[in-house]
Amino acid sequence: MNKQISQGIFDYTLFLLTAARGCVDEPHMYGPLRLVDAVSRIVDIFSRANLLQDQFLANLKKKIDEKKLIVMESEDEFVKFIDDLIATSVEEMKKRMGGRS
C-alpha cells in the first residue's frame, strides 16, 4: 500500500473514531452527517491515489460535498437528501448488476 493511501486510511480511521465518540454527546443528526461525510472521504482517498476511477462515485461525492451541510438548516431536507443518495445508488446497483435485483 502506498504512503498516500496509508495516510488517507489513517486519517479516515481517526475521523471514524472521533465521529463515534462524538455521537455520544453531539446532536442526534451529527451521526448521519458523519456517515455521509465518510462516504465522501473514502471515495476521495482512493480517487487521489488513482485507484478509483468511477464516475458514479465521483458524482456521488460531489453531490455529498455540495449538500451535506443542509442538515444545519433542515433535518427533514437532510433526511430527504440521504434518501435521494440511497435511491440513486440503488438504481446504479441495478445497472451494475445488469438489471438483476
Image: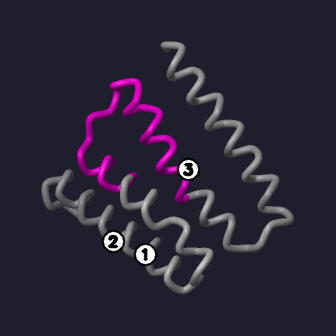
Residue reaching furthest to the left: 98
- Asked if residue 95 lies left or right of residue 17, the reply is left
State whether residue 5 is above or below residue 47. Answer: above
Q: Is residue 24 magenta?
A: no
The type of residue carrying mark 3 is Ala
Cα distance between the residues tagged 1 and 3: 16 Å
Task: Report how far apart the C-alphas of labels 1 and 2 lie in the structure.
Answer: 6 Å
Look at the picture and state if 32 lies above or below 16: below
* Tag 2 near tag 3, CB within 8 Å: no
Question: Eyeballing the image, is 15 above or below 56?
Answer: above
Residue highlighted by disc 2: 87
Q: Is residue 82 left or right of residue 100?
A: right
- Magenta residues, start to end: 36-61
The kind of secondary structure the magenta stretch mainly shows is: helix
Q: Residue type at mark 1: give it.
A: Asp
Residue depicted at 44% across the width and 39% down the height: 44
Considering only order in the chain, which callout, 3 or 2, is on the residue closer to the N terminus? Answer: 3
- Residue identifier under label 1: 83
Residue at the image position 54 percent from the left and 14 percent from the top: 3
Q: Which SS class for mark 3?
A: helix
1 and 2 marks in contact (CB < 8 Å): yes
* Residue depicted at x 68% and y 43%: 15
The residue mark sitting in front, 2 or 3, is: 3
Residue occupied by mark 3: 38
x and y percentages locating residue 78 in the rendered image = 52, 77
At label 3, counting other C-alpha atoms closer than 10 Å, the crowd grade (few under 14, some 14-19, many 20 or more) is: some
